[in-house]
Amino acid sequence: MSLVTLRQALDEARRGGYGLGAFNVTDLLQAESVLGAAAETDSPVIVETLAGSSSHASDERFWRGLLHLVEEYPRIPVVLHLDHGPDPDACRRAIDAGFTSVMIDGSLAPDRVTPATFAQNLAVTAEVTAYAHERGVSVEGELGTIGGSKVDGSRAEIRLADPEEAADFVAGTGVDALAVAIGTSHGAYKFDSPPDGSVLHMDLIERIAAKVPDTHLVMHGSSSLPAELRALVNKYGGTLPESWGVPEEEKVRSIAMGIRKINQGMDSHLAFTGAVRAQLAHDGLTVDPAPYLRAGRLEMQRIVAERMRVFGQAGHAGDYTPIPLADMRARYAA
Ligand code: 13P
């Protein structure tokens, strides 16, 4: 079994001086793209998924499929991570299903619209961390609010992370990783023009890293939204407006500044959907889904592999062996 915890994978990435892409998947085919890219580039990898986001009949069925698929890649260290767990129950479900890492997104109050207070965020995150660490599983929390769409479709306004809160949050929750709101947002619509320092607050990364040196920082909303992928989608019937994402060079710079986990979902979706649309348009007689789904899978694998090389994780799959969950549990208990 190649499953590893987020804690171990990010510790190793820090030792090796590289970043780890966390690639969102909404079905098993997308998971095959990510794992295929990891095998192609010899990369450790984080496969992440949102609760309730898949096209499969239930989370549990999808998650069981993910676990089986991971077994097909015994040489690749794979973190199976729940992205933006909206509440402790979703996190417990993922942990009980076999995930090695969960994010509890306590940045919004239980109504998932109002920003949570610091105390609310801390309490819900500490609750999940206690449950997870008793089982050796890693936890990511969120400081500030990342913009854009959240797990349940609600739109969240950006609230930048406050470096002064970081140490108290980590001390009060024990999280292994911390998503920091630095101005990015989720989804296909991010910046109205190429981002500069007025919207992308890279300085916050260094300031927060200095406050919590043992906690791994996470950048969300990291898709670049390549113009050529948007153009492909639009050429074959899409209507995506122009938008700019996080440039590749900023992601590389963020890794040097202290970001260790880089979340990407939208670029994968753009690549997959662009290829599917093109394939369908080129063959008007197509009714068998396999050829266009295969085109989507391969195009997504291409862009994910490209990112793995950019983040520096390529070539590091063989650097370490997974620490069993029981040993991780003992470490947390010590
Ligand atoms: P994008 O929407 O930029 O791909 O970011 C995904 C993400 O941060 C998932 O948590």
Image (spheres, helix red, strand yellow):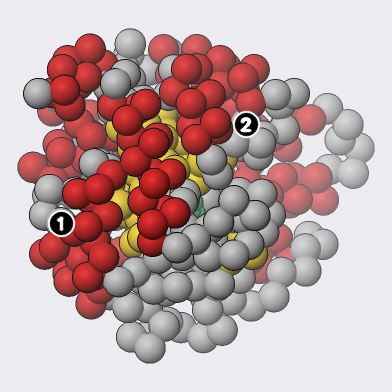
Image coordinates of residue 3 in percent, x first then y, are 33, 20
Amino acid type at circle 2 is: Asp
**Within the image, what quadrant is residue 102 found in?**
top left
* Secondary element at image label 2: loop
> Which residue is at the front of the view, 258 or 241?
258
> Which residue is at the front of the view, 46 or 172?
172
Q: Residues within 10 Å of mark 1 (few under 14, many from 20)?
A: some
Can you see residue 274? no
Say the numbered circle drawn on residue 212.
1
Amino acid type at circle 1 is: Val
Q: Nearer the viewer, mark 1 or mark 2?
A: 1
Image coordinates of residue 222 in percent, x first then y, are 43, 61
Write the residue at 73% across / 51% down: 278
Left or right of 284? Residue 278 is left
Left or right of 225? Residue 5 is left
**Above/below status of 245 relative to 269:** below
Write the residue at 28% across / 44% down: 173
* Mark positioned earlier in the residue sequence (1 or 2): 2
Q: Are marks 1 and 2 in contact (CB under 8 Å)?
A: no
Q: Quadrant of the N terminus?
A: top left
**Above/below status of 307 relative to 332:** below
Q: Residues within 10 Å of mark 2 (few under 14, many from 20)?
A: some
Image coordinates of residue 78 in percent, x first then y, are 34, 27
**Within the image, what quadrant is residue 136 found in?**
top left
> Which residue is at the front of the view, 133 or 178?
133
Say the numbered circle drawn on residue 155.
none
> Which residue is at the front of the view, 189 or 103?
103
What is the spatial separation of the Cα atoms under label 1 and label 2, in whole angstroms? 35 Å
Residue, disc 2: 27
